[in-house]
Image (spheres, rainbow, N blue to C red):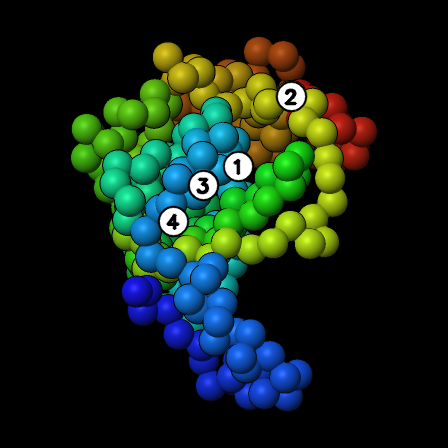
Amino acid sequence: MTSFAYTEKALELQKRFDTEALAAAELQVIVHNSLSPNDRASIEQAEMFWLASVDPKGSPTVSFKGGAKGFVRMPDDTTLVFPCFDGNGMFFSMGNIASTSHVGLLFMDFVTPSRLRVQGDAQLTDDPAIVGLWPGAQFAVKVDITALITNCPRYIPRMQRLEGSRYVPDTATGEQPIPGWKRIDAIQAVLPKRDQGKADMGLITMDQWGEMVGKGDPLA
């Protein structure tokens, strides 16, 4: 039995809209605390998820995380691990995890469609045995699952997958091309030393990069 519980305000809304009995039943049916075979199958196919975290003041943020299919690993039925690849250098979500540990993960399949929510307590890890699972990872995140919620596909638009991101690190070598924004001329001086001088496709302006994003250019 999961320790998941409704807040006082959630209970008030359930009462207002006559969903108290339904919500109580859902605690027994769709809320669980260990990965089911269906959960595993869904996560194994995932190339992305959304990560929610909170800072010490309770201010939330949501970030997108992507990788090759199967990049979220499940060492056991109550644990998830995923990599932190090179990003924009802000470490916004990762800093929140290091500060408060509380996270929510949303896995969404737009083709089937289906969705799975995961709540847990997370920690950053530099353990080589874990980080080494993903060539190119800077470090990894371990999530101790506190609740899983299987949601219905209602309201999810059906979409077809076209292709994966060219920037996902190679699963064997960890190599990845430099992203378009690291070619912007105005930021060359503040890039990490490891990225300076790598704009082999030439520098671009902020406006040019914005145009690339707006047009859906895969090199953006």
Residue at numbered disc 3 = 38
Residue at the disc numbered 4: 94
Query: What amino acid does circle 2 point to?
Result: Glu
Labels 3 and 2 touching (C-beta < 8 A): no
The circle drawn on residue 163 is 2
Marks 4,2: beta carbons within 8 A: no
| Residue depicted at x 51% and y 58% | 61
Q: CA distance from mark 3 to mark 1?
A: 17 Å
- Residue drawn at point x = 33 percent, y = 57 percent: 33
Q: Nearer the viewer, residue 136 or 89?
A: 136
Residue at the image point whose x is 57% and y is 34% from the top: 187
110 shown above or below 143: above
Drawn side of residue 169 relative to residue 155, left or right: left
Sequence-earlier tag: 4 or 2: 4
Question: CB atoms at circles 2 and 1 under 8 Å apart?
Answer: no
Compare residues 14 and 144 and report the one nearer the observer.
Answer: 14
Mark 2: give few (<14), some (14-19) or many (20+) Cα within 10 Å.
few
